[in-house]
Image (tube, helix red, strand yellow):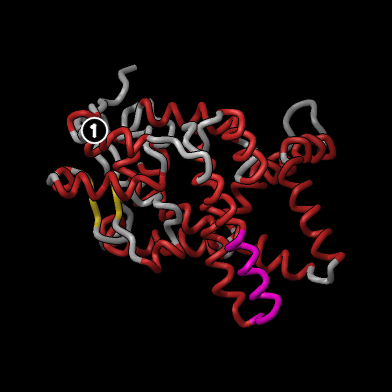
Amino acid sequence: MSAAARVKPEDFFSADEWRGLTARSNWKGLALVAHCWLVIGLVMLCGARWPVTIPLGVMLIGNRQLGLFILMHDAAHGLLHPNRKINDVVASRFCGSELHLYRPYHLQHHRFVQQTEDPDLVLSAPFPVTRRSLMRKVVRDLTGQTFFKQRFGGLAAHLSAPPPGMTRWSVVVAEARKQRVFLISNGLGFLVFALAGYWWLWVALWLVPMATWLPLVSRLRNIAEHALIVQNSTDPLRHARTTRANLAERMLIAPYWVNYHCEHHMFTQIACWNLPRAHHALTRDGVTARMEMQPGYLAMLRVAAPV
């Protein structure tokens, strides 16, 4: 297996620039985690006070749920905090419990990005698609079908045809053990909100965003980052795509600078909050003209689903 080609930071930045871009912070990553949960809490308070805001709240919280994953992604690279133990504990407790499983998978993606051995190729391989096909995917996302398939599809399949030596009850028990963190954390969340008299708020502004808007923005992220990228390319400036994002797109689709994905693949040592600085430096030097870029998410969808 041949790893993807790499860039040399010294070919793009001065020594001082590179030191500044890769400097670790004791507080910025932690502040972003706190910011993410603060936004979720404020949106829930608005939903409790003004239920008319719940549809917008579903989109805002679904995007912050993706934001938690993006921060866990930074932690997988050891970028959330310079102390590796703090980095991992904060990510596992407050961003996602599966950091230990995600890290080796994701680092393999980086090593072989857009090469035959890339485990994420399956996410971008179907594109381009027709607009009708894309709309069917969007409908499945927004109606919870994608969430159900990803979270409980295996259980449904095994219940209809239990594996040899297993009963339907043993299938349920095995799946409950596998999903125990998800079930316990969401069960406790529901219980706390129910005891406070707001069980409906947990459903409307945690579970519904998780089952609808989160799958959609996750799909849009995957399309923007790697769809229609040439496989087995030797050009490291075109292994991933950067998509410019306006304020609305950052609030609803692309949290925490996730849209600077080409820069992230070029320079994995740069934390998410410094990716805009790297992008500006590359733009200044004319490098972005050689990179895979799109002016916005709508423009990217037109390319991914042209007819």
Q: Quadrant of residue 87?
A: top right
In the displayed orientation, state which residue is furthest to the front. 16
- Predominant secondary structure in magenta? helix
Is residue 52 found left or right of 232 in the rendered image?
A: right
Residue 179: % across, % down: 72, 41
- The residue tagged 1 is 236
Residue 108: % across, % down: 43, 26
Q: Quadrant of the N terminus?
A: top left
Q: Quadrant of residue 44?
A: bottom right
Residue 182: % across, % down: 71, 45
Residue in the image at 60% along x and 49% along y: 149
Give the residues in magenta.
Answer: 38-51
Q: Quadrant of the C terminus?
A: bottom left
Question: Is residue 83 located in the magenta-colored stretch of the structure?
Answer: no
Question: Is residue 47 located in the magenta-colored stretch of the structure?
Answer: yes
Residue in the image at 45% along x and 56% along y: 255
Residue in the image at 32% along x and 50% along y: 276
Residue 211 vertical placement versus 157 (above, below): below
The amino acid at mark 1 is Pro
Is residue 261 found left or right of 236 in the rendered image?
A: right
Query: In front: 262, or 163?
Result: 262
Is residue 151 found left or right of 274 in the rendered image?
A: right
Residue 52: % across, % down: 62, 82
Find numbered disc 1 in the image and state the secondary structure of the residue it sits on: helix
Query: In front: 207, or 18?
Result: 18
Q: Quadrant of residue 193?
A: bottom right
